[in-house]
Amino acid sequence: MRRLVIWFTVPVLLLVMGAAGVVVWTTLNQGGGPGTPAIPLAKQAGSPDKTPEDGSGATGKQSVGEAITTCRREVALAESVLAAAGDGVGHWREHVQAQTDLSLGRTEEDEAEKIWKRTRQAGASDVAKYQTAKSGRKADGNACRPVADAEDDQVEQLKMCQARLSKVTSALTNADLAMKDWQRQLEELKDADEDNLHDYEDSWLDTWRKAPKNLDRYSSAMDTLAKTKSCPR
């Protein structure tokens, strides 16, 4: 009978001790302890609070210094593309001017032929250089915008760079039109039949008459740019 009581008592004690252990472990796991309130499980399961980084909080806000640097870089990239177009537009202008001088009797045909040959030979390099520079630039529409908390001198720098970028962009638009004219002319020359240039001549004269429109717009934009202050370094 005593053995039966002992066998019965031991399992009951083990069950009680096990239950107590579970309670202690759960309390400790929730951060509880003597004098320490338990942390709700729902709070434990959640991720820790973070400062938003989507621009709505301080972490995502661009500093004034960063804004000025970004603006300067955007202006420099745009100017580099414009510079790459310079040789091509210049050769195209010479190509057109040779026909103008020939039509007005200012030059002989053999002299015009020399100019056409020289500019045509440079054409492929002109187009390749411009396209490479153009493809390497990805315009940033947010560059040079006003920034909160900027000092007066910083606001002035951004304004000057923004004005410069606006004029460079206008010149780039017109440079692109002129370069497209030059590229089309080069393609026509490549496809022309040298033994029968009558058809090509008619096409060329039509192109020549239309060419000054984009060339003049480019020149006007470049003149305006020359009068615009550079972006401060």
Image: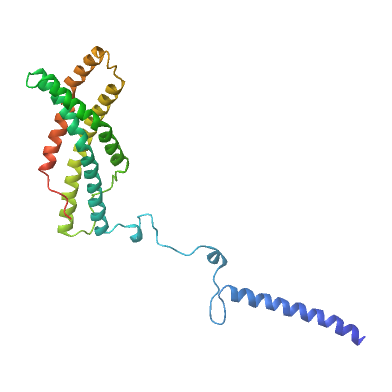
Q: Residue at the location (66% across, 75% down)?
A: 23
Q: Position of residue 45 (x, y in %)?
A: 55, 64
What colour scheme has been applied to the protein in the rendered image?
rainbow
* Figure check: 146 above or below 198: below
Q: Nearer the viewer, residue 214 or 120?
A: 120
Q: Residue at the location (18% across, 60% down)?
A: 151
Give the mark count.
0
Q: Position of residue 164 (x, y in %)?
A: 17, 45
Asked where in the image residue 7 lies, by quadrant, the reply is: bottom right
Q: Nearer the viewer, residue 176 or 207?
A: 207
Asked where in the image residue 195 lies, by quadrant, the reply is: top left
Q: Position of residue 47 (x, y in %)?
A: 50, 63
Q: Residue at the location (19% across, 41% down)?
A: 168
Q: Report whether 143 appears left or right of 39.
A: left
Question: In the rendered image, which quarter contains the C terminus?
Answer: bottom left
Asked where in the image residue 118 lies, by quadrant, the reply is: top left
Q: Position of residue 6 (x, y in %)?
A: 86, 85
Q: Report whether 100 appears left or right of 70.
A: left
